[in-house]
Image (tube, coloured by chain):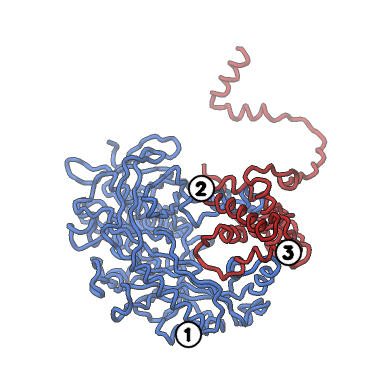
Amino acid sequence: MAETKYDVLIIGSGASGGMAAYTLTKKGIKCLMLDAGPAIDFERQRVNKSSYELPFRGFGKPGRLSHVFQATEFNANQWVDEVQVPYTHDPKEPYNWVRVRMIGGKSLFWARMSFRFSDYEFRAKDHDGYGDNWPISYADLAPYYDQVEPIFRVRGRRDGIQQLPDGIFIEDTSGESEANRRFIAAARERGIPNTKMRTSMGRGQFASSFNLLLPDAMASGNLTIVPNAVVREITVDKNTGLANGAKFIERQSHREMHAGARVVVVGASCLESTRLLLNSGIANSSGTLGRYLHDQFYITESVQAVIPEARDGKSASGFSNGFIGGGGYMPRFRNLKAKEKNFLRGYALDWSTGGSPDAKYFPLYGEALQKAVESCRGAGFSCTVMGEVLPRVDSQVRIDKGVTDAWGIPVLHIQTRYTSNEFNMAKDAIATLEELCHACRWEVLGRHDQMFPPGYSIHELGTCRMGESPKTSVLNKWNQSWDIKNLFVVDGSSFVTGGSQNPTMTILALSMRASEYMAGQMRKGQL
Amino acid sequence: MKRRRFIQALAASPAAPALLAQQAVPQINQPAAPANAPLHYASSDEGAQAVLHFFNPQQFAALRKLSDILMPANLAPDGMPGSVEAMAPEFLDFLLSESAGDRQQVYRNGLDGLNSQARKRFGKLFADVDAGQADMLLAPLREPWTHDVPSDPVAALLRAAKDDVRRATLNSRAWNLAAVAGRTRGGGGGLYWLPID
């Protein structure tokens, strides 16, 4: 086996792996980072084109990336090729596994919505009796959110909403348009809070590990990054039972290599991390590795409405006349004080005014349709519903030994589906939104409660969860394997519940917290 | 030393890059070459006719008529191309030929149904009905939007075609040229990701 040159091997360069590198290298710890994808020169990798120049006029090649609803003909090459890295599922239970393999990972493309979890998530079982609590509370993670938000330059407004804790924000002092004020007031009358969207501003065109975390880690002189390294197995010393590195395959040459280190940190993205542990046959004495997969269900364009006063060009000056435009975020408001509805937990609403409803919503065609589209340009209201999905023991992934990827690595079989709890929540969300639109005297063009298949939100969580006991969880409260003390898993796979908030800030805070603990243990000679 | 062997030996020597570079640059003064005229390229649609593969002649004639009704020329503002000028029906023939079977069935069954209804109600194919008759056959398009795809084959076709014809027109070279000429918005475009090596 090769000589161990590095203190820590980090697998994955996205939000979680990047934060581990950022934290550890600043403490003088030598890190080797492996990522399955290449380093991208964004200036050379992307070119401006018109739709007509594309082979399929912007429709995309039929059948390519059939699970990636976010894919367009313009961005198709940025996603993981489903033929090269397949996965399996029951045809009746589709799962949209949306993946990116390049330095920076999915943090290059996220929606930047930056929220904290609260004890409604961390202590969820205490609140409603379902499932399990996290082994930590909000107070444990708050100091790390405090450090992460300034790095990502989160813009937001402090509103003192208990279920959506305030953070260290670049204060959003923008006003509200008249249409928005009306919508917010209608919500307030019904006990629904609203705040400004909380967004990572980042630097330049990215708010990514690629530009906010890795450069500082590299500048420390303690980080080595190896792109195009497809990790197939974490290796374990038979004598000590400790992890001692990982075997990987060079993406292009298919040459097999081994990287050694004293400690192994896995941040390969939720399901890739679990796939790696399952393929390595480690860290599963509890039998829970692969279980409790959850995410947030998404219903985009859930309610489409037209704001009559903004029709026929009256929205043209939009923000300047203060009538229409902008949006907001309504955090979970159901089931906070008591069990109020026919479902557990709740959903959040990401809404906006000033858009243009798609032509499909108008029951017209030809010239009449064109006139209606022009009339309603900039006069629309739209909302995405984001609902909490319950973690269930039978929502799981396992290795499908009959199928391998382009590097001969067995793939995942994913088994999950939404149930009545999510469906009832969706119905409540749509009814609530429609009621709000009617209260504002807005014309509802279309409404639906049909969520995308699981996975669509790209917020896959769980399958390698933290917990209080090695019998019911894979990781302890420090994201450390119960079974192998020098193995840490720092991405979304460690989540116990997912809430309705976008998870990236929590992933970053958890990774920073785990890395600081790790560094302390290494300093004490415990690792 | 034979010339080939000399070149091989030269290439292997530490000084090879510099020596070969010197060889490759002839030191001859030449008058400046005249600038080339810029090259302009046409799209396939501009330079040629599509060879149709997917629809039979009756289906294609119905699609062409339907496209013209859904997205006619000279919608505001004047001068914008319609779906026929944008060769949307020809493009959809290609797109459908590459599509999954269920999508193909929506179009084939729907266009057959549209022709069947036209023949039953007006004694002619859909391509030959007048504006008033077409309006009656397109009644499902005046129903409010629902998320669920209609079970009726003609209604399902009309719903799919309404989106596809519009998009194929807005994303066409013809529309792009008109948009560039300042007659309307769009033409559609963006940052294209090149394939990753």
Looking at numbered disc 3 in the image, what kind of residue is underneath it?
A: Ala
- Relative depth, front residue between B62 and A417: B62
- Relative depth, front residue between B6 and B168: B168
Chain label for disc 3: B
User: Around disc 1, counting alpha carbons within 10 Å, would you say few (fewer than 14), some (14 to 19), or many (20 or more)?
Assistant: some
- Residue A57 percent location from the top left of the image: 63, 52
The residue depicted at 58 percent of the width and 71 percent of the height is A355
For chain B, the rendered hue is red
Q: Is residue A197 above or below residue A267?
A: below
User: Quadrant of the rendered structure where residue A246 is?
Assistant: top left
- Residue B121 percent location from the top left of the image: 66, 61
- Relative depth, front residue between A126 and A175: A126
The residue at which mark 1 appears reads as A186
The residue at which mark 2 appears reads as A64
Looking at numbered disc 1 in the image, what kind of residue is underneath it?
A: Ala
Asked if marks 1 and 3 touch (Cβ < 8 Å), the reply is no
The residue at which mark 3 appears reads as B131
